[in-house]
Image (tube, rainbow, N blue to C red):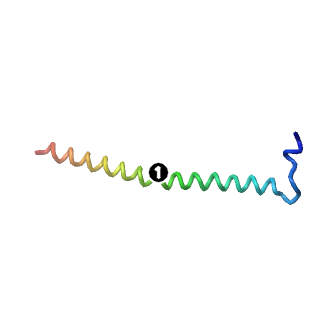
Amino acid sequence: MLGSWVRAPGGSLFKTAKMHKALIIKHYRSFFFYIKPAFYRELEHLIQVKSEDLNSSKF
C-alpha cells in the first residue's frame, strides 16, 4: 500500500501535484473565458429587449 505513494527522489510527487494544480487552473480559465462572452451577449440582448419594450410603451 505504501509502495504506491513512494516516488523517486527529486520532488517528483510535488511536481506532479503542481502540474495537476496548473491543469485545473487552466481548465477554470478556459471555462470562464468561454462563459463570460456568452453571459455578456445574453445580458446585452436582455437590455436591448427591455429598451424596446420601454420605447414601445411610450407610444
- The residue drawn where x is 53% and y is 51% is 31
Provide residue 23's location: percent of width, then percent of height: 65, 54
Provide residue 49's location: percent of width, then percent of height: 26, 47
Instruction: Pick out the residue farthest to the top.
Output: 1
Q: Is residue 47 left or right of residue 37?
A: left
Q: Is residue 16 left or right of residue 32?
A: right
Looking at the picture, which amino acid does disc 1 mark?
A: Ile
Residue 15: quarter of image: bottom right
Q: Nearer the viewer, residue 14 or 56?
A: 14
Provide residue 45's location: percent of width, then percent of height: 31, 50
Identify the image quadrant of the N terminus.
Answer: top right
Q: Is residue 55 left or right of residue 48?
A: left
Q: Secondary structure at mark 1?
A: helix
Please tell me how many numbered marks the rendered image carries. 1
Identify the image quadrant of the C terminus.
Answer: top left
Provide residue 20's location: percent of width, then percent of height: 70, 52
Q: Is residue 33 left or right of residue 57?
A: right
- The residue drawn where x is 79% and y is 54% is 14
- The residue drawn where x is 13% and y is 45% is 58
The residue singled out by tag 1 in the image is 35
Q: Nearer the viewer, residue 2 or 56?
A: 2
Few, some or many residues within 10 Å of mark 1 (<14, 14–19, 20+): few
- The residue drawn where x is 27% and y is 50% is 48
